[in-house]
Image: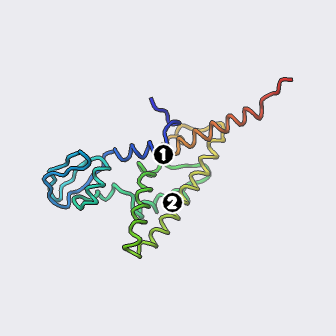
């Protein structure tokens, strides 16, 4: 069994790439091959469930679009920012939307890719990057404080994403080792 400590961001990103997402067919498609995986037939207007990496290729090809709640959008990022920076007090930490960090990376990448074709995307990219940094910095401060605290509730730990749980456990382990070495009585 893989423990949270051994998971890397790349491992979690791989899991996201292979997770199921919902798409809506934009056009009829008899069958399409995506890296030795065959999809179809697809009927225009109908919703389908498939792995993210397959859906992403079909989106690029213009056959499907993600259901509106699947990818992260600026409005959702703004809601997370508001909740994290304005609503939460002290060490309170709220649960992030499912798969938040992989979706965030893909959202920022997609907006950055639009910059050359759509100059108006520059404003969205700057604002989204600022919101993402605020969220990350706010949560990071809380995680570090929680990891250095000897008592913590299970509910708080459940509110952390898998990426944050890994970070939390690494910080907690480092702090515990440091405390142990500082307080260790020297044998003479």
Q: How many neighbours does mark 1 have within 10 angstroms: few (below 14), some (14-19), or many (20 or more)? A: some
Q: How many neighbours does mark 2 have within 10 angstroms: few (below 14), some (14-19), or many (20 or more)? A: many
- The answer to which image quadrant residue 56 occupies is bottom left
Q: Position of residue 177 (x, y in %)?
A: 68, 34
Q: Residue at x 41, y 75 (%)?
A: 120
Q: Which circle marks residue 78 in the picture? A: none
Q: Residue at x 42, y 61 (%)?
A: 109
- The answer to which image quadrant residue 45 occupies is bottom left
Q: CA distance from mark 1 to mark 2?
A: 17 Å
User: Helix, strand or loop at disc 1?
Assistant: helix
For the C terminus, the quadrant is top right
For the N terminus, the quadrant is top left
Q: Residue at x 48, y 43 (%)?
A: 162
Depth order, front residue of 62/138 = 62
User: Helix, strand or loop at disc 2?
Assistant: helix
Q: What residue is disc 2 on?
A: 132
Above or below: residue 3 compared with residue 92? above
Looking at the image, the residue that sits furthest to the front is: 36
Q: Position of residue 104 (x, y in %)?
A: 44, 56
**How many marks overall?**
2
Q: Nearer the viewer, mark 1 or mark 2?
A: 1
Q: What residue is disc 1 on?
A: 9
Above or below: residue 137 compared with residue 4? below
């Amino acid at each position: 069994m893989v423990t949270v400590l051994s998971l890397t961001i790349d491992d979690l990103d791989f899991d996201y790439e292979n997770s199921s997402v919902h798409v809506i067919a934009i056009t009829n498609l008899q069958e399409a091959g995506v890296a030795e995986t065959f999809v179809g037939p697809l009927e225009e207007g109908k919703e389908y469930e498939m792995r993210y990496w397959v859906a992403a290729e079909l989106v690029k090809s213009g056959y499907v679009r993600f259901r509106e709640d699947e990818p992260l959008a600026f409005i959702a990022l703004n809601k997370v920012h508001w909740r994290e920076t304005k609503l939460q007090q002290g060490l309170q930490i709220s649960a992030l939307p499912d798969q938040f960090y992989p979706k965030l990376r893909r959202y920022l990448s997609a907006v950055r890719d639009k910059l050359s074709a759509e100059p108006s995307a520059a404003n969205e990219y700057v604002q989204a990057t600022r919101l993402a940094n605020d969220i990350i910095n706010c949560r990071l401060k809380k995680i570090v404080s929680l990891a250095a605290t000897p008592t913590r509730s299970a509910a708080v730990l459940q509110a952390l994403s898998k990426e944050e749980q890994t970070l939390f456990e690494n910080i907690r382990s480092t702090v515990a080792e440091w405390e142990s070495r500082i307080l260790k009585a020297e044998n003479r």
